[in-house]
């Protein structure tokens, strides 16, 4: 029996709730995981056996008596509302500050600047001219709020199956839900596994014939023109990228 087991009865009386697993440091309680649940859901993490950042942190903090569980909102009557609140809390803190692997499922877009929201709602989009021809990478499964610049660059540059590597595609547009989150210059393409990744665990098999580009951030005037705008593009037909500006 753990210290937290004595709270199970109370948890059964509060319907859906949003909780935070916290690192206690004196009077400071810093969340490192946000979740939603019902019943003893928040306590189930204490028995997880998989080797993850979250589980390792729980184990260490528990041994040091520095693990806290905070109930952020409770008595939520339906799961849809609970999902929305969970996603909002995750977006507020940013996944980059949490051990959550996903942003939450309560919203399609999640956290966005007022400028980005304007372009999403208004339907305004920007067409890439031929002079800035490139590839729009659709990061809908890999983009997360609070990603560092390096994390965003690394999920954009690789690793891709059969990307269009022609020299005319000079720019890489990192997009999420149609929004351009960053623009990079493409200097060259190399086989996946050529470059080191610092924020991703890449398991690469040579026979898969995947590729990654060598590049860097585009000049500031290019970034000012496109970042935060909704990109106009053709259908990708299931591919995680599409050529633009052609």
Image (cartoon, rainbow, N blue to C red):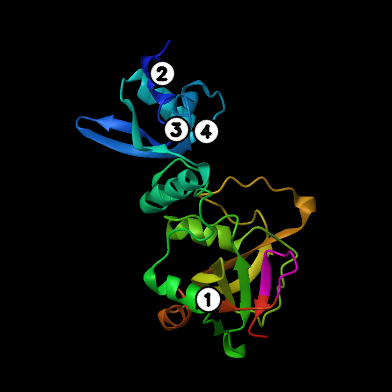
Q: CA distance from mark 4 to mark 3?
A: 28 Å
In the rendered image, which quarter contains the C terminus? bottom right
In the rendered image, which quarter contains the N terminus? top left
Label 1 environment density (alpha carbons within 10 Å; few <14, some 14–19, many ≥20): many
Q: CA distance from mark 3 to mark 2?
A: 12 Å
Q: Is residue 105 magenta?
A: no
Q: Quadrant of residue 59?
A: top left
Give the percent coordinates (x, y) of residue 95.
44, 49
Residue tagged 2:
9
Q: Mark 3 or 2 closer to N-term?
A: 2
In front: 18, or 223? Answer: 18
Residue tagged 1:
230
From the viewer's perspective, is the residue at label 4 or at label 2 nearer?
A: 2
Q: Residue 15, labelled with which disc?
A: 3
Mark 4 and mark 2 in contact? Answer it, CB < 8 Å: no
- Residue pictured at 36% horizontal, 49% vertical: 93
Looking at the image, residue 234 sits to the left or right of residue 229; the answer is right
Q: Mark 1 or 2 closer to N-term?
A: 2
- Residue pictured at 49% horizontal, 42% vertical: 78
Q: Mark 1 or 3 closer to N-term?
A: 3
Q: CA distance from mark 1 to mark 2?
A: 49 Å
Q: Mark 4 or 1 closer to N-term?
A: 4
Q: Is residue 82 above or below residue 186?
A: above
Give the percent coordinates (x, y) of residue 72.
34, 39
**In this picture, which residue range is highlighted in magenta?**
235-242
From the viewer's perspective, is the residue at label 1 or at label 2 nearer?
A: 2
Mark 4 and mark 1 in contact? Answer it, CB < 8 Å: no
Residue tagged 4:
52
């Amino acid at each position: 029996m753990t210290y937290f087991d004595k709270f199970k009865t109370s948890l059964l009386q509060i319907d859906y709730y949003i909780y935070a697993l916290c690192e206690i440091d004196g009077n400071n309680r810093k969340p490192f995981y946000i979740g939603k649940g019902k019943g003893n859901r928040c306590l189930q993490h204490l028995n997880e056996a998989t080797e993850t950042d979250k589980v390792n942190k729980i184990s260490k903090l528990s041994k040091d008596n520095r693990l806290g569980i905070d109930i952020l909102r409770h008595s939520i009557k339906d799961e849809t509302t609970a999902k929305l609140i969970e996603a909002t809390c995750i977006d507020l803190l940013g996944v980059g500050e949490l051990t959550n692997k996903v942003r939450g499922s309560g919203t399609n877009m999640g956290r966005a600047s007022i400028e980005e929201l304007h372009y999403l709602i208004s339907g305004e989009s920007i067409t890439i001219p031929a002079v800035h021809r490139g590839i729009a990478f659709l990061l809908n499964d890999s983009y997360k709020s609070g990603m560092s610049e390096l994390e965003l660059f690394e999920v954009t540059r690789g690793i891709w199956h059969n990307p269009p590597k022609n020299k005319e595609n000079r720019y890489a547009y990192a997009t999420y839900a149609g929004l351009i989150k960053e623009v990079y210059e493409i200097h060259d393409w190399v086989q996946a596994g050529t470059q080191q990744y610092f924020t991703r665990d890449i398991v690469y098999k040579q026979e898969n014939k995947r590729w990654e580009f060598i590049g860097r951030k585009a000049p500031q005037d290019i970034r000012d023109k496109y970042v935060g705008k909704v990109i106009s593009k053709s259908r990708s037909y299931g591919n995680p990228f599409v050529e633009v500006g052609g």
